[in-house]
């Protein structure tokens, strides 16, 4: 039986397969020859799963057509398979069945079916607005470079704007954005796009309605949801903690920001704090980062973005739920509260399941890669595993150096991270069947 989770998971697999075949074509490569299937599969998976890990130099390995295919895969993967399908149905004028709406509901992580299609229309408009605005801002920056013509500046602007908004992290520059470490406009434009994309569509829509009501003189009409409060506050705290953490860890490291002036150090630390939100761009060499900086990055990548966004990770709301659960235990409370709202037990169980599944996936990936490539440094392998699972795309430079087996492991990890551990389990095991049996309770020792 084709359940909703299976439809979504198979949809992503189909996109990866089509992308792999397109990237294998001679027209997709600068060399004009047939491509390597592992490289094509890895790149297509990284694009569809909006990860950004790459085993080749995107700007020199792929032709203009190949780069366009890559950008198309990033856009579809960022929006999500069902969202992209919905857009196609809207263009064709087809009606939405109950199964279509149910699949869309699970993809967007919303509670009601009724507003799913309308939300997709809002997502289309919002995505277009931010990506076009980002492209215009980046074009004004790239066009100032005398080495770039108008056409090349426009393509660079469009590619990096879409890649940033979809949290993909693919860049047409060999060193990502390291050439713009001290560029205030580049840092502010890219980080703004990443934050807007990682905060979640529903949060952005609530902010829009709040602003609209304020302009209409109805400031008290809009009431922010618990999801809005948790996503925004947790994101802000993580950004600030990451900024301070990176500044302290790398301040004296001459290989990263140690030799930069104070203002550039602050700029680079801010960028390093934002990009682990699953974006994948970098303005410093992560391969030369201190161990402390690497572990801070691993922690931020594992948390990732917010629900309903183009980012991955276990999500900011999951972290907040577990934090509030821990605080309730320490205070001797039997209910978990957040902003004077009680969090349902079903949500607590789901959060625990997400974290457990995420940890086990990262552990399994790390174990398999260390077995296949025993000479690789453990911290770098762990970094790569978390980056793949959280669909971040940051790397210490070992992606192209690992064995074919390890690359295939990373392909599976990126896929699991994009569709979600619980979604994949539901696709494999089928929909859960409710039980009419209530078993007796018994305590056991924990902690």
Image: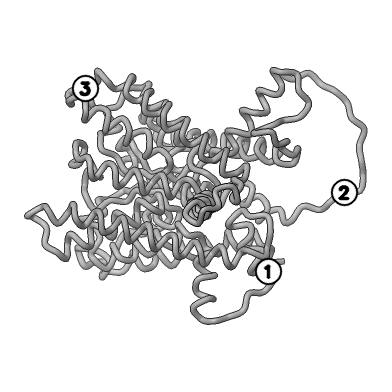
Disc 3: CA contacts within 10 A as few (<14), some (14-19) or many (>=20) = some
For the residue labelled by badge 1, is the local secondary structure a helix, a strand or a loop? Answer: helix
Label for residue 280? none
* Location of residue 13 with respect to 171 vertically, above or below: below
Residue receiving disc 2:
435
Q: Position of residue 277 (x, y in %)?
A: 43, 40
* Location of residue 48 with respect to 91 vertically, above or below: above
Alpha-carbon span between mark 3 and mark 1: 55 Å
N-terminal of the pair, mark 3 or mark 1, is 1
Q: Position of residue 424 (x, y in %)?
A: 62, 52
For the residue labelled by badge 3, is the local secondary structure a helix, a strand or a loop? Answer: loop
The residue positioned 23% from the left and 44% from the top of the image is: 185
Q: In the rendered view of the protein, which quadrant contains the C terminus?
A: top right
The residue positioned 33% from the left and 48% from the top of the image is: 54
Q: Nearer the viewer, mark 1 or mark 2?
A: 1
N-terminal of the pair, mark 1 or mark 2, is 1
The residue positioned 31% from the left and 30% from the top of the image is: 269
Residue receiving disc 1:
99
Alpha-carbon span between mark 1 and mark 2: 24 Å
Residue receiving disc 3:
258
Tell whether 404 sits left or right of 341: left
């Amino acid at each position: 039986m084709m359940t909703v989770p299976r439809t979504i998971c198979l949809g992503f697999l189909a996109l990866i397969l089509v992308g792999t075949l397109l990237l294998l074509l001679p027209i997709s490569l600068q060399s004009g020859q047939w491509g390597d299937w592992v490289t094509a599969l890895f790149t297509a998976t990284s694009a569809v799963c909006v990860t950004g890990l790459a085993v080749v130099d995107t700007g020199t390995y792929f032709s203009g057509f190949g780069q366009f295919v890559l950008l198309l895969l990033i856009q579809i993967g960022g929006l999500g398979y069902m969202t992209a399908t919905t857009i196609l149905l809207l263009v064709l004028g087809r009606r939405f069945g109950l199964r279509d709406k149910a699949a869309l509901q699970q993809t967007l992580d919303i509670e009601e079916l009724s507003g799913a299609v309308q939300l997709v229309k809002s997502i289309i408009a919002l995505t277009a607005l931010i990506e076009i605005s980002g492209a215009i801002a980046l074009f004004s920056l790239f066009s100032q470079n005398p080495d770039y013509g108008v056409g090349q500046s426009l393509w660079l602007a469009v590619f990096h704007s879409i890649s940033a908004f979809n949290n993909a992290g693919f860049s047409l520059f060999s060193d990502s954005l390291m050439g713009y470490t001290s560029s205030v406009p580049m840092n502010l434009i890219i980080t703004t796009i990443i934050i807007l994309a990682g905060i979640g569509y529903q949060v952005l829509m609530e902010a829009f309605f709040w602003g609209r009501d304020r302009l209409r003189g109805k400031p008290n009409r809009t009431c922010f949801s618990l999801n809005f409060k948790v996503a925004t506050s947790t994101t802000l705290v993580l950004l600030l903690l990451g900024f301070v953490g990176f500044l302290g860890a790398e301040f004296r490291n001459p290989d990263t920001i140690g030799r930069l002036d104070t203002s550039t150090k602050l700029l680079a630390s801010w960028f390093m704090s934002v990009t682990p939100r699953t974006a994948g761009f970098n303005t410093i060499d992560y391969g030369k980062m201190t161990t402390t900086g690497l572990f801070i990055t691993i922690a931020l990548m594992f948390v990732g973005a917010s629900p309903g966004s183009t980012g991955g990770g276990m999500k900011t709301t999951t972290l907040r739920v577990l934090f509030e659960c821990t605080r309730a235990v320490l205070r001797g409370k039997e209910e978990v509260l957040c902003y004077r709202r009680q969090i349902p037990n079903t949500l607590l169980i789901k959060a625990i399941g997400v974290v457990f599944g995420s940890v086990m996936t990262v552990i399994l990936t790390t174990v398999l890669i260390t077995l296949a490539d025993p000479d690789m440094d453990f911290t770098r392998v762990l970094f790569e595993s978390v980056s793949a699972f959280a669909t971040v795309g940051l790397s210490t430079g070992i992606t192209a150096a690992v064995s074919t087996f390890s690359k295939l492991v990373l392909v599976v990890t990126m896929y699991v991270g994009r569709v979600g551990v619980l979604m994949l389990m539901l696709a494999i095991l089928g929909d859960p069947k409710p039980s009419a049996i209530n078993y007796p309770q018994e305590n056991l020792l924990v902690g």
